[in-house]
Image (tube, rainbow, N blue to C red):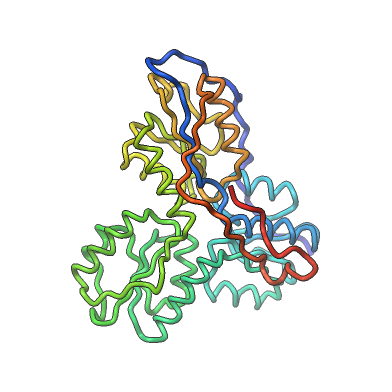
Amino acid sequence: MTSPAVHLPVPRVPGRRGSLQDMPVAGHKRVLLAAPRGYCAGVDRAVIAVEKALERYGSPVYVRKQIVHNTHVVSELESLGAIFVEEVDEVPSGSHVVFSAHGVSPAVVSAASDRGLQAIDATCPLVTKVHREAVRFARDDFEILLIGHEGHEEVEGTAGEAPEHVTVVNSPEHADTVEVRDPEKVVWLSQTTLSVDETMETVRRLRLRFPHLQDPPSDDICYATQNRQVAIKKVATGADLVIVVGSANSSNSVRLVEVALEHGAKAAYRVDYADEVKQEWLDGVETVGVTSGASVPEVLVQQVLEDLAGAGYRDIEEIRTAEEDLIFSLPKELREGRGTGGRASA
């Protein structure tokens, strides 16, 4: 059987590395390096799941959506034989398909089953927790206000658990206008990768309108998202410039730029690769803050640091605000006869 045509993004052609110039500034050049940064346990688990599936079953292994929201990771897995598709109906019957770390709705699971696909569920366990909360509150006939970005895979997957009961709330401003059927039976849940501060502002506004609004049993915003935001807040207070390594479709990476600006950074930019750092960003800059989103391999951060060193930013101070040692077991389909854990996150 021939595989269906899959339209993948054109591979990026890297620019010239090491092109940043060492220009004089008034004070001492230094880098404040945020920690924790980079891979979280859920991302680590998902990436390893694709690698292990390729080892065990051979190429191709199909992946619905990007396994994690990082251009480099997707390209690396493509080079190993992974094929990324938008929906399971693009996957040849009987093939192995991996569900991404962002999770899928029951409708996607059913569609994969109907095609006889051998599914490997790499959903982050913290996302699965939110799915279970949605099922539980829907069963008790609550209306669920799901705080998150409309169209994001994670939001679609969570909403799909109980579509009749879920209303997505996109922003604090949306909280001022959203309507509910019964203000006495309403609960909020959230996407795991949001800005903590903005989410709490959304909840505050919702509670003003719906005093009986219930909270989730525990935090929905994941530990890694919160830790990276806390670290960049501390870095931003002393930084003229913050560079966030992460992809444009990575919600938590985009939030880190916003959080840096809100907490004192004079400028903040997101880059996928080191060669995207522009010389003019460094004009007059003494202190550069550096961090990365939760789906970013550490090698990309090190490349940024190498290029900054070439521009005179050789003094690196790590600002650590938390320790992370959580490791999630691999999907059950990949555990037998294999290691059950992932790599330690940075």
- Which residue sits at x=37%, y=53%? 195
| Outermost residue to the top | 24
Residue 30's spot in the image, x, y percent?
46, 26
Where is 171 relative to 180, above or below?
A: above
Q: Residue at x 22, y 65 (%)?
A: 177
Question: Would you say 182 lies left or right of 114 here?
Answer: left
Residue in the foreground of this view, choosing between 262 and 155? 262
Residue 159 quadrant? bottom left
Q: Residue at the spot x=57%, y=46% of the render?
A: 296
Residue 89: x, y in percent? Answer: 63, 67
Q: Is residue 27 above or below residue 15?
A: above
Horizontal and vertical percent position of residue 98: 66, 64
Image spot of residue 239 (x, y percent):
38, 32
State the quadrant of the N terminus. Answer: bottom right
Relative to residue 335, is residue 293 drawn left or right? Answer: left
Residue that extends furthest to the left in the rendered view of this protein: 208
| Number of numbered discs on residues | 0
| Closer to us: 259 or 321 | 321
